[in-house]
Image (cartoon, rainbow, N blue to C red):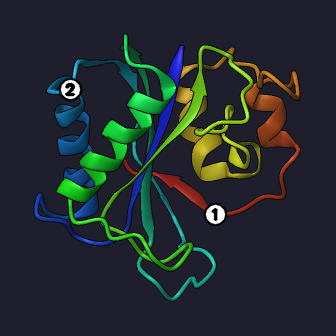
Amino acid sequence: MILIALGANLPSPAGAPPETLRQALFRLAQRSITVEKQSGFYKTAAWPDPADPPFINAVASLRTELSPLQLLAGLHEIEAEFGRRRGIANAPRTLDLDIIDYDQRVEQGPPELPHPRMHTRLFVLCPLRDVAPAWQHPVLRATVSELIAALPPAPIERVS
Protein backbone atom coordinates (compact mmCIF):
# COMPACT_ATOMS: atom_id res chain seq x y z
CA MET A 1 0.00 0.00 0.00
CA ILE A 2 1.27 3.44 -0.96
CA LEU A 3 0.10 6.26 1.31
CA ILE A 4 0.39 9.99 0.77
CA ALA A 5 -0.56 12.90 3.01
CA LEU A 6 -2.16 16.01 1.58
CA GLY A 7 -2.40 19.41 3.24
CA ALA A 8 -3.12 23.04 2.42
CA ASN A 9 -3.82 26.24 4.31
CA LEU A 10 -3.69 28.89 1.58
CA PRO A 11 -5.93 29.28 -1.46
CA SER A 12 -4.55 27.97 -4.74
CA PRO A 13 -5.62 28.54 -8.35
CA ALA A 14 -8.17 25.74 -7.71
CA GLY A 15 -9.76 27.63 -4.80
CA ALA A 16 -9.89 27.16 -1.04
CA PRO A 17 -7.84 24.35 0.57
CA PRO A 18 -10.60 21.67 0.44
CA GLU A 19 -11.04 22.22 -3.31
CA THR A 20 -7.27 22.24 -3.78
CA LEU A 21 -7.03 18.80 -2.14
CA ARG A 22 -9.89 17.45 -4.29
CA GLN A 23 -8.26 18.78 -7.47
CA ALA A 24 -4.82 17.45 -6.46
CA LEU A 25 -6.32 13.97 -6.07
CA PHE A 26 -7.85 14.32 -9.55
CA ARG A 27 -4.45 15.37 -10.98
CA LEU A 28 -2.85 12.17 -9.68
CA ALA A 29 -4.96 10.16 -12.13
CA GLN A 30 -3.48 12.17 -14.99
CA ARG A 31 -0.03 10.86 -13.98
CA SER A 32 -0.69 7.10 -13.99
CA ILE A 33 -1.50 7.14 -10.27
CA THR A 34 -4.74 5.55 -9.08
CA VAL A 35 -6.33 6.78 -5.85
CA GLU A 36 -7.77 3.66 -4.24
CA LYS A 37 -9.14 5.26 -1.08
CA GLN A 38 -9.11 8.67 0.54
CA SER A 39 -9.81 9.90 4.04
CA GLY A 40 -12.13 12.62 5.12
CA PHE A 41 -10.74 16.13 5.46
CA TYR A 42 -9.41 17.24 8.84
CA LYS A 43 -8.89 20.78 10.11
CA THR A 44 -5.92 21.54 12.37
CA ALA A 45 -4.20 24.66 13.63
CA ALA A 46 -1.16 25.80 11.69
CA TRP A 47 2.21 24.98 13.20
CA PRO A 48 4.48 26.52 14.39
CA ASP A 49 2.36 29.70 14.25
CA PRO A 50 -1.30 29.04 15.11
CA ALA A 51 -2.07 32.60 13.93
CA ASP A 52 -1.56 31.36 10.35
CA PRO A 53 -4.67 29.97 8.60
CA PRO A 54 -5.67 26.46 9.73
CA PHE A 55 -4.70 23.47 7.60
CA ILE A 56 -6.99 21.04 5.84
CA ASN A 57 -5.37 17.58 5.76
CA ALA A 58 -6.15 14.19 4.26
CA VAL A 59 -4.50 10.88 3.42
CA ALA A 60 -4.95 8.76 0.30
CA SER A 61 -3.88 5.25 -0.61
CA LEU A 62 -2.53 4.88 -4.13
CA ARG A 63 -1.56 2.36 -6.75
CA THR A 64 1.16 3.15 -9.28
CA GLU A 65 4.04 1.59 -11.18
CA LEU A 66 6.17 4.66 -10.44
CA SER A 67 9.17 4.23 -8.17
CA PRO A 68 9.19 6.19 -4.89
CA LEU A 69 11.52 8.78 -6.44
CA GLN A 70 9.36 9.11 -9.57
CA LEU A 71 6.26 9.44 -7.41
CA LEU A 72 7.91 12.13 -5.29
CA ALA A 73 8.88 14.06 -8.43
CA GLY A 74 5.29 13.85 -9.66
CA LEU A 75 3.96 15.06 -6.31
CA HIS A 76 6.34 18.03 -6.40
CA GLU A 77 5.16 18.88 -9.94
CA ILE A 78 1.53 18.81 -8.78
CA GLU A 79 2.40 21.05 -5.82
CA ALA A 80 3.97 23.54 -8.24
CA GLU A 81 0.87 23.46 -10.47
CA PHE A 82 -1.13 24.61 -7.46
CA GLY A 83 1.25 27.46 -6.68
CA ARG A 84 3.49 25.84 -4.06
CA ARG A 85 6.73 27.73 -3.58
CA ARG A 86 9.35 26.07 -1.42
CA GLY A 87 11.30 28.26 0.95
CA ILE A 88 10.71 28.67 4.67
CA ALA A 89 10.10 25.38 6.50
CA ASN A 90 6.58 24.98 7.93
CA ALA A 91 5.37 28.16 6.21
CA PRO A 92 1.77 28.42 4.99
CA ARG A 93 1.31 26.70 1.64
CA THR A 94 -1.14 26.16 -1.17
CA LEU A 95 -0.46 22.41 -1.28
CA ASP A 96 1.77 19.89 0.46
CA LEU A 97 2.00 16.29 -0.78
CA ASP A 98 4.17 13.79 1.12
CA ILE A 99 4.80 10.09 0.71
CA ILE A 100 4.02 8.54 4.09
CA ASP A 101 4.61 4.88 3.25
CA TYR A 102 5.46 3.00 0.08
CA ASP A 103 4.65 -0.71 0.42
CA GLN A 104 6.26 -0.89 3.88
CA ARG A 105 9.70 -0.03 2.46
CA VAL A 106 12.40 1.23 4.80
CA GLU A 107 14.83 3.34 2.78
CA GLN A 108 17.14 6.28 3.46
CA GLY A 109 15.94 7.92 0.28
CA PRO A 110 15.32 10.15 -1.32
CA PRO A 111 12.57 9.92 -0.39
CA GLU A 112 13.13 8.65 3.13
CA LEU A 113 10.65 5.85 3.80
CA PRO A 114 8.57 5.73 5.85
CA HIS A 115 8.19 9.48 6.25
CA PRO A 116 10.52 10.30 9.16
CA ARG A 117 8.07 12.45 11.16
CA MET A 118 4.69 11.01 10.24
CA HIS A 119 4.36 9.11 13.53
CA THR A 120 4.46 12.40 15.48
CA ARG A 121 1.69 14.14 13.53
CA LEU A 122 -1.96 13.74 14.41
CA PHE A 123 -2.87 15.56 11.20
CA VAL A 124 -1.39 12.59 9.32
CA LEU A 125 -2.35 9.77 11.68
CA CYS A 126 -6.06 10.61 12.09
CA PRO A 127 -6.82 10.63 8.36
CA LEU A 128 -4.51 7.62 7.90
CA ARG A 129 -6.72 5.70 10.32
CA ASP A 130 -9.71 6.42 8.00
CA VAL A 131 -7.89 4.89 5.03
CA ALA A 132 -5.99 2.01 6.66
CA PRO A 133 -7.09 1.31 10.24
CA ALA A 134 -4.92 -1.83 10.46
CA TRP A 135 -1.78 -0.13 9.08
CA GLN A 136 1.40 -0.71 11.05
CA HIS A 137 4.50 1.50 11.02
CA PRO A 138 7.22 -0.51 9.21
CA VAL A 139 9.96 0.50 11.67
CA LEU A 140 8.18 1.12 14.98
CA ARG A 141 5.81 -1.84 14.50
CA ALA A 142 3.01 0.16 16.14
CA THR A 143 -0.47 0.39 14.65
CA VAL A 144 -1.88 3.73 13.63
CA SER A 145 -4.18 3.67 16.70
CA GLU A 146 -1.22 2.99 18.98
CA LEU A 147 0.71 5.86 17.43
CA ILE A 148 -2.25 8.20 17.95
CA ALA A 149 -2.63 7.10 21.58
CA ALA A 150 1.07 7.80 22.23
CA LEU A 151 0.74 11.48 21.25
CA PRO A 152 -0.49 14.29 23.49
CA PRO A 153 -4.03 15.38 22.72
CA ALA A 154 -4.35 18.23 20.24
CA PRO A 155 -7.32 19.84 18.51
CA ILE A 156 -8.21 18.14 15.26
CA GLU A 157 -11.64 18.25 13.66
CA ARG A 158 -13.02 16.14 10.86
CA VAL A 159 -14.78 18.55 8.49
CA SER A 160 -15.91 16.18 5.72
Viewer-proximal residue, 94 or 160?
A: 94
Q: Name the residue under label 2.
A: 31
Q: Earlier in the sequence, mark 1 or mark 2?
A: 2
Asked where in the image residue 129 lies, by quadrant, the reply is top right
Residue 103 x, y percent position in the rendering:
60, 14
Residue at 69 percent of width and 52 percent of height: 121
Q: In this view, does 155 lie to the left or right of 20?
A: right
Residue 142 x, y percent position in the rendering:
85, 25
Residue 105 vertical position relative to residue 47 in the rendered view, above or below: above
Residue 107 vertical position relative to residue 84 in the rendered view, above or below: above
Say what secondary structure mark 1 lies in: loop
Name the amino acid type tagged 1: Pro
Q: Mark 1 points at which residue?
A: 155
Residue at 37 percent of width and 10 percent of height: 65
The 10 Å Cα crowd at callout 1, few under 14, some 14 to 19, many 20 or more, is few
Q: Distance between the residues labelled 1 and 2?
A: 34 Å
Name the amino acid type tagged 2: Arg
Residue 85 x, y percent position in the rendering:
33, 70
Q: Is residue 29 left or right of residue 100?
A: left
Residue at 39 percent of width and 51 percent of height: 159
Residue 39 shows in this picture = no
Tag shown at residue 66: none
Quadrant housing the N terminus: top right
Residue 4 x, y percent position in the rendering:
48, 34
Say what secondary structure mark 2 lies in: loop
Residue at 30 percent of width and 72 percent of height: 10
The 10 Å Cα crowd at callout 2, few under 14, some 14 to 19, many 20 or more, is some
